[in-house]
Image: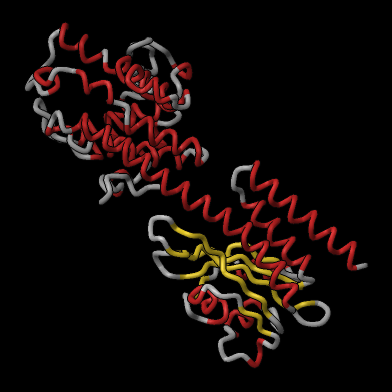
Amino acid sequence: MSIQSRESIELRALLEISRRIALEPQSDSLFQEILEYAVRVTDAEGGTIYFYDEVMQELIFKFVISPDPEVAKRLQGMRLKKGAGIVGRVAETLKTELVADARHDPRFASAVDRKSGFRTRSILTVPLEFYDTETQAQTLVGVLQVVNKREGIFDQSDVEKLEAFAGFAASLLTRAKLFERLRRQYLGTIASLAEAVDVKDPYTHGHSLRVSAYSQMLAQAIGLSPAQTFHLRISSLLHDIGKIGIPDPILQKNGPLNDEEFARIRTHCDEGVKILKPVRMTPEIYEGIYHHHEKWDGTGYPSKLKGTDIPLFARIIAFSDACDTITTERPYKKPRSFAQAREIILKDTGSHFDPELAPVFCGLPLEEVPTTHPDGILSLP
């Protein structure tokens, strides 16, 4: 292949990757494609993208390309300590390393070759980093590495090419990191709103967090997508937000509500949607908030929906809401055990609760669910 044609391929690769990063959401396929292009333009036998785990201070083999698919399988998910081997050294110094003969470099992590069955000869490794405006410093997010140049040895030209692709991979990881930071801030705000309702009544303190925890657990058990689970998390946290406008004497009444008081309580579903409507959330979130008091037989409120006409989020929240009400102390009742809560829910299956979801919910280890988190956000994903 001529130098000119190789350069045109490299240029097209860079343009295509930059276009996709700009227009598409983050996905594993993009990382894999960046690695494939990096291996191709440096004429390497294989390569790896490592993600950096800040908490454990370890590098995780996330994406691997190898002539032998079995090698990639063996390496997937393997971890290296920061500072260990050439990769760990690059993670520590944030400086590119070019090693012409890995076998004679004392830093080479030969245990990786022994585990994978791959024979590493030469290595080119670059850090994936970004400038963190919070810490005002370059921050490690991962490492990109290619191994074994097919012809000749890696040179400065390969360094420049790999650093270009490292920039793309780092930008994707940075975007994910910043998105997660925003996501947690958003969830923190949501949790604060939920807490504002719960603190109106000392008996319901933490209720919204627990309802959200149980709901997420059921969502995972029935295989909802990560996006749906996230939206359910918001809906369940805010399911009682409409109670913020209910007078305290009604919320805290030590005894049964009269008809007028109960009618006022029932308005919290509609009020919750009205409060949140300007935020422009997804329809599923509003549906969970508005319909979580509907019953399978059509006797619930506010719309007397029946069966599967009740939105899925509302059916899920109904289980969680009932379970927490049964297992916590209220002014008018003592708490019951989770075993008793399961019995009550199963007894009301087909009248109050979705008969397909009931056995799934009752089979969950609800007692093990964390109810609070230091930052006010549930620790479930």
Q: Which of the image's four quarters has the N terminus?
A: bottom right
Residue 111 image position (x, y, % from top left): 57, 83
Horizontal placement of 10 versus 242: left or right?
Answer: right
Q: Is residue 316 above or below residue 291?
A: below
The picture quadrant where one finds residue 345 is: top left
Horizontal placement of 314 versus 109: left or right?
Answer: left
What residue appears at the point 38 percent right and 30 percent down from the top-left corner? 235
Residue 376 image position (x, y, % from top left): 27, 45
Asked whether 82 or 15 is in front, the reply is 15
The picture quadrant where one finds residue 155 is: bottom right
Scheme of colours in the image: secondary structure
Asked whether 167 or 289 is in front, the reply is 167
Residue 366 image position (x, y, % from top left): 31, 43
Q: Residue furthest right?
A: 2
Q: Is residue 292 above or below residue 37?
A: above
Asked whether 78 or 242 is in front, the reply is 242
Is residue 1 visible in the rendered structure shown here?
Answer: no
What residue appears at the point 32 percent right and 20 percent down from the top-left corner? 275
What residue appears at the point 64 percent right and 76 percent down from the top-left corner? 116
Is residue 101 visible in the rendered structure shown here?
Answer: yes
The picture quadrant where one finds residue 39 is: bottom right
Q: Residue furthest left?
A: 254
